[in-house]
Image: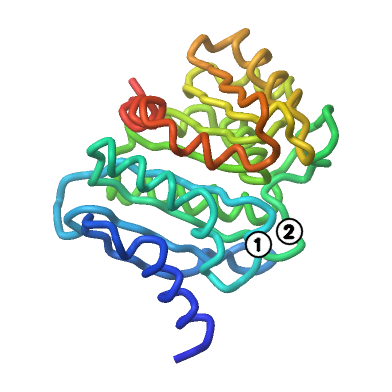
């Protein structure tokens, strides 16, 4: 067995092995214009059930980039899944794609407070978007309960995705990210919870403030959760917010 496969299963047992929830795991790849995107699919609950399940797309941060198809589930996602479990949520599907090394979900300067969304997504984000479009057509999921969550680089990816396809997700969790405030006003329907540490020394706190303010002009269901003394690791607090996570997973597209 390849070394990276052993690493994956060791990591999986460490992160999720103590959970009592039934979960089927699939490791695969999504095709892209400039390569392939590693993907981990987690199917919680009865995988043989014909009942459609909620779907969560999880976008990792810059530190988890690569091609091991493992690192993208290490940060943030274990806390998120544990909070879902504590909230009594045990039937859902998660997609955790892995952005290749030296690529990005969004083509922006993370340290800047001004961003302009490019005409086309980066090829990794485009590959994910096309795959989600195909998944919707397969009728395997509850299309009224589709969600997106991302941290840091994935927070930027979350804001961009819901700007490009405001019709796709019922709700979004954007953690310590940012984006193009002009494009944010395209999101008239997706509920958003943005989280950011005020002491963030990697991505300016102002980025989330600006995105929430811009989106609120067209969408009242947008919220900013600030952590005064937290630096860049605000996902540890964000994904443990039990009430918010419950509201998030019960959001529906009308």
In the picture of the structure, the residue carrying the numbered disc 2 is: 103
Where residue 219 sits in the image (x, y, percent)?
54, 12
Q: Quadrant of residue 72?
A: bottom right
Q: Is residue 180 above or below residue 39?
A: above
Where residue 101 sits in the image (x, y, percent)?
71, 65
Q: Residue at x 25, y 40 (%)?
A: 89
Q: Residue at x 21, y 59 (%)?
A: 22
Q: Residue at x 54, y 54 (%)?
A: 75
Q: Nearer the viewer, residue 122 or 90?
A: 90
Where residue 44 sits in the image (x, y, percent)?
27, 54
> Image quadrant for the C terminus?
top left
> Image quadrant for the N terminus?
bottom left
Q: Is residue 46 above or below residue 155?
A: below
Is 25 on the left or on the right of 48, as rendered? right
**Most extreme residue toward the bottom, as rendered?**
1
In the picture of the structure, the residue carrying the numbered disc 1 is: 65
Q: Residue at x 83, y 41 (%)?
A: 109
Instruction: Tell me, yes or no, whether the two marked residues, 1 and 2, touch with CB atoms within 8 Å.
Output: yes
Coloration mode:
rainbow
Q: Residues within 10 Å of mark 2 (few under 14, many from 20)?
A: some
């Amino acid at each position: 067995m390849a070394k990276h496969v052993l690493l994956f299963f060791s990591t999986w047992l460490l992160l999720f092995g103590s959970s009592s929830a039934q979960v089927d795991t699939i490791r695969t790849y999504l095709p892209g214009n400039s390569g392939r995107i590693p993907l981990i699919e987690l199917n919680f609950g009865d995988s043989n059930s014909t009942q459609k399940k909620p779907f969560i797309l999880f976008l990792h941060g810059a530190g988890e980039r690569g091609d091991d198809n493992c690192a993208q589930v290490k940060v943030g996602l274990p806390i998120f899944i544990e909070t879902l479990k504590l909230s009594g949520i045990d039937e859902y599907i998660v997609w955790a794609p892995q952005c290749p090394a030296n690529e990005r979900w969004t083509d922006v300067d993370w340290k800047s407070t001004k961003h302009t969304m490019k005409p086309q997504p980066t090829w990794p984000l485009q590959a994910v978007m096309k795959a989600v479009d195909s998944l919707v057509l397969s009728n395997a999921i509850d299309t009224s309960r589709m969600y997106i969550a991302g941290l840091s680089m994935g927070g930027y990816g979350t804001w961009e995705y819901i700007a490009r396809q405001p019709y796709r997700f019922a709700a979004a969790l954007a953690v310590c990210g940012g984006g193009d405030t002009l494009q944010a006003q395209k999101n008239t329907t997706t509920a958003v919870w943005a989280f950011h540490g005020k002491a963030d020394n990697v991505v300016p706190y102002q980025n989330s403030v600006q995105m929430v303010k811009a989106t609120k002009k067209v969408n009242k269901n947008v919220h900013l959760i600030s952590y005064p003394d937290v630096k860049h690791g605000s996902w540890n607090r964000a994904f443990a917010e039990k009430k918010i996570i419950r509201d998030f997973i019960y959001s529906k597209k009308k």
